Amino acid sequence: MSDGLLVFLYALATAVATGLGALPFLFFREVSDRFVAYANAIAAGLMLGASFGLVAEGTAHGRLETLGGVLLGVVFILVTQHYLGEYDEEELVFGAASGESARKMFLMLVVMTVHSFSEGVAVGVSFGGGVELATVITLAIAVHNIPEGVAITAVMRPRGVSVAGCAGWSILSSLPQPLMAVPAFLFVEAFRPGLPWGIGFAAGAMIFMVLGELLPEALEEGRRSEVATLTTATIVAMMLFQRFL
């Protein structure tokens, strides 16, 4: 097996792992407004925890570059929101959803897909240190991707998307990982300087999505204390998960 194919298969496994995040939602049949609120709170906590971890990782490669990436991520989401705002709610359709629900699902997938680019580069670059190091990094990213699938499903499932559909969209959002891993492996020195920019970009986009979209909706439909508790607990859990992985 060629090295390039091995890198691709490793990164593809991390993408497939994202789909596992939809499995817990097989046990939820009824979806109420309160459930949507708490699902958004869980997604917000997972994304914030992941973002804090990304910023910490990015600053190890370059502080100013990571900060620049964060700002670019915020600008990217603002531009995307502006573009989506030019459509009437009736015109915006995403799967079976339309209007505001379609907009939120689309933004979630955009943010997570952007995040996947930096993870794909990380997998490819890690192969520069040998297969053993790459195996550890790939396993870490694959396990890390499962709660990302939970976050995606937490936004999409309450809005009418099937569990299989949520799993499919979750995997699709992670496909940049195998696509970016191979060129990052082949041109490792060229990709390494851009890693903190990509990491910061993903973190900035996720933080803005949480603060501008998920938490406001969660607080609108759910009890403030319960939303705060869920969000805080999932932030801590996600950070501990990354710390001890």
Image (spheres, rainbow, N blue to C red):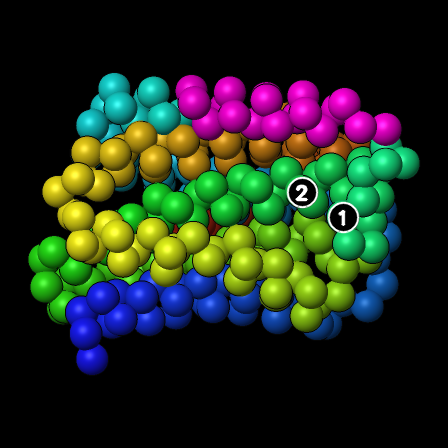
Q: Main secondary structure of the magenta part?
A: helix
* Residue sitting farthest toward the left: 129
Which residue is painted at 18% across and 69% down in the image?
Answer: 3
Label 2 amino acid? Phe
Whether pointer 1 and pointer 2 mark residues with C-beta atoms closer than 8 Å, the reply is yes
According to the picture, the residue beneath numbered tag 2 turns out to be: 106
- Looking at the image, is 34 positioned above or below residue 99? below
Q: Is mark 2 on a helix, strand or loop?
A: helix
Give the x, y percent position of residue 238: 44, 49
Label 1 amino acid? Phe
Q: What element carries label 1?
A: strand
Residues rendered magenta in the picture: 71-88
* Residue sitting farthest toward the right: 90
- Among the 4 quarters of the image, the one containing residue 90: top right
Q: Distance between the residues labelled 1 and 2?
A: 7 Å
According to the picture, the residue beneath numbered tag 1 turns out to be: 94
